[in-house]
Image: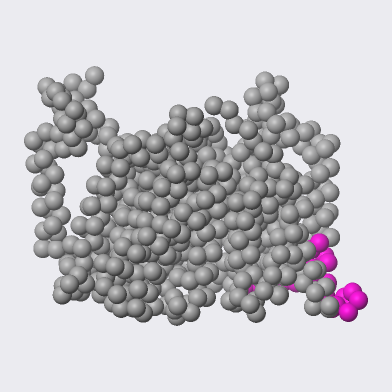
Amino acid sequence: MSLPCGTRNYDYAEDMAIVRTKTHWLLLICFFILLFTAPLYFNNYWLGVCNLIGITLIAAVGLNILVGYCGQLSIGHAGFIAVGAYTAAILTNRLELPFLVGLISAGIVSGLIGIVFGLPSVRVKGFYLAITTIAAQFIIIWVINHWSLTGGFVGIKVPYASIGGLVFRSESSQFYLIIIIAALCVFFAKNLARTKVGRAFIAIRDNDLAAEVMGVNLLFYKLLAFFIGCFLAGISGALLAHWIGFLNAEQFSFTESILYIGMIIIGGLGTSIGPIFGVIFIRLLQQILTMEIVPLLEKTFTALPAGFATGVTPILFGLVIVLFLILEPRGLAHRWALFKSAYRLWPFSY
Amino acid sequence: MAEFLQFIITGISVGMVYALIALGFALIWKSSSVANLALGQIVLVSSWFTYSMLKQAELPLYIAFPLVVVFALFLGWVIERFALRPLIAQPILSLIAVTLGIGYFIEGVITFIWPWSVDALPRLFPREVIHIGPAVISQEYVWVIGICLFIFVLLTLFFRYHRMGIAMRATADDQMAVQACGIPVTRVFSTSWMFACVVAAIGGILISSISGITHGLVETGLKSFSVVILGGLDSFIGAIVAGPIIGLAESLGGGYLTPFTWAGVKDIIPFVVIIIVMIIKPYGLFGEVRIERI
């Protein structure tokens, strides 16, 4: 990280600090104040969008650890989210366990399922692993659709989240719950990347053979990456279940998995800020497109083809993913870094 | 017994179609090591295009079929030229993700143009059933097997004797050496994409003439990956052998396992095969085991 002019690091703690200068602290505190007072200026509709963004962010952070840091390509992330969502739903609805128990066990069950499907990663990588995770996605969805415990095609109802006597019923109370967990996850991911584990992940991503020769235990760390990635997916799924209140396997389709890959690519792989950008970009685009632009266009141009409303979103998202890969493969995070350094060096940018 | 024979014939013919689609995958993988995950969507869009030609434009088959081939060639060329060419020498993750993006894009185009999402192709093959021993089998399955075998032979001859086929095999073997010899590698890439799309389109027409055009064709494309995995990624013969195996597993499993498990177990068998192969023999039956050096 490049520092503002005149700022020097004199000890290790300063070197490792995430928030380094007073300006950083000020900006961070302002950001948190803005974030936590958001229910004051957003109406319920936009709070709902924020909640969806927060939930998606948790899963995207997990996927970023798995794909961006550890280099293990997973295209079945929606399947793992579904595992978490259904675990939470079954535990709180059928067994009437408290919300927190459901949340944690959703993460753990999802992580364990992730380890099972991640086992081939010990021997294969790249495309083989991509195919394995696609297979995992379809197998998981099939099991959910046919197992009597999950409610099958009919779906399953999920009660509101509650901690002690506190029930998260309104959008704004759920907003606080989701945002706090999402912030913790982002903080965890940011710190994970700087620990021994995170460095091992990066070594595996860059060259797994070299990493093994250097003494990184491939089996352990690859499966750990799968566990962490899918654990976060499970947490996100559980929150999604309590937020929507009703689950159906259609919410976890293969296209959703592709969208998650798209998010972390657009945001920037292997960066801590990337998933935030990617998730906000994709989810906002989705909302604005389906809720604002498409109805507007349909009102103005009456001769639009029947498939316009459903077709335009995948067309645009497909295009965005392809264009980002071609034009800016390092994602929005790289643009953000460029902007920051330009701002820092202005007006002498050479 | 009659039931068993029926399962075998349908299994083999569906498996042949899988093999055909998988061949399209192997073609691209061999020449340019791009994993084409948009295969299912390519299959679907070419089936819909065939539908438009045959039913909406009401063209006879001998005009419609060449048009479909031209469409598939064009599709392959466009994808290679505008999405994959700029990404040459990028990491495998980008190459996989870009095909996912393309697939998503094509899916959008499909819902855009053909929003009703389920339809049937007109019958391409005679209706009369055939009797093989005690089994009664719809004739189209036999036709499908025949056409697939014909295309396999055609492709094998192409790779053995045609200049471009030899260039493609050479590119698969060693890209650097081929470039040094003056073979235009980019043209080899786009040819392989065009061929792959044509093969996938034919597979799509064959399977949708039997079971109709649905969104499930995308899944058919994904299922054909199990063929590629079982046969070995870079092996044509692997695809041809593994296709019928997967088809048989699917139809026999669907026929005999359903009472013991939940309904629809048929759709999941290819994916289970993928997981099993990955754990036991990840490079497939005929695939080349790559030994990596640092």
Q: Which residues are magenta?
A: B119-145
Residue A68 visible (yes or no) = yes
**Residue ID at (48%, 79%):** A148
User: Is residue B175 rendered to the left or right of residue A241?
Assistant: right
Residue A69 in the image: state x and y as whole percent: 39, 41
User: Is residue A241 rendered to the left or right of residue A210?
Assistant: left
Q: Is residue B269 magenta?
A: no
In-front residue for pair A169/A120: A120
**Residue ID at (40%, 39%):** A201
User: Is residue A98 rendered to the left or right of residue B217?
Assistant: left
**Residue ID at (11%, 40%):** A25
Residue A340 in the image: state x and y as whole percent: 22, 33
Residue A37 in the image: state x and y as whole percent: 11, 58
How many numbered marks appear? 0
> Looking at the rendering, which quadrant does residue B202 occupy?
bottom right
Quarter of the rendering occupied by the N terminus of chain A: top left
Residue A3 in the image: state x and y as whole percent: 18, 27
In the depicted structure, whether residue A99 falls above or below residue A18: below
In the depicted structure, whether residue B186 falls above or below residue A176: above
Quarter of the rendering occupied by the C terminus of chain A: top left
Q: Is residue B144 magenta?
A: yes
- State the scheme by which the image is colored: one colour
In-front residue for pair A262/B288: B288
In-front residue for pair B264/A256: B264
**Residue ID at (50%, 65%):** A140
> Looking at the rendering, which quadrant does residue B132 occupy?
bottom right
Residue A343 visible (yes or no) = no
In the depicted structure, whether residue B262 falls above or below residue A298: below
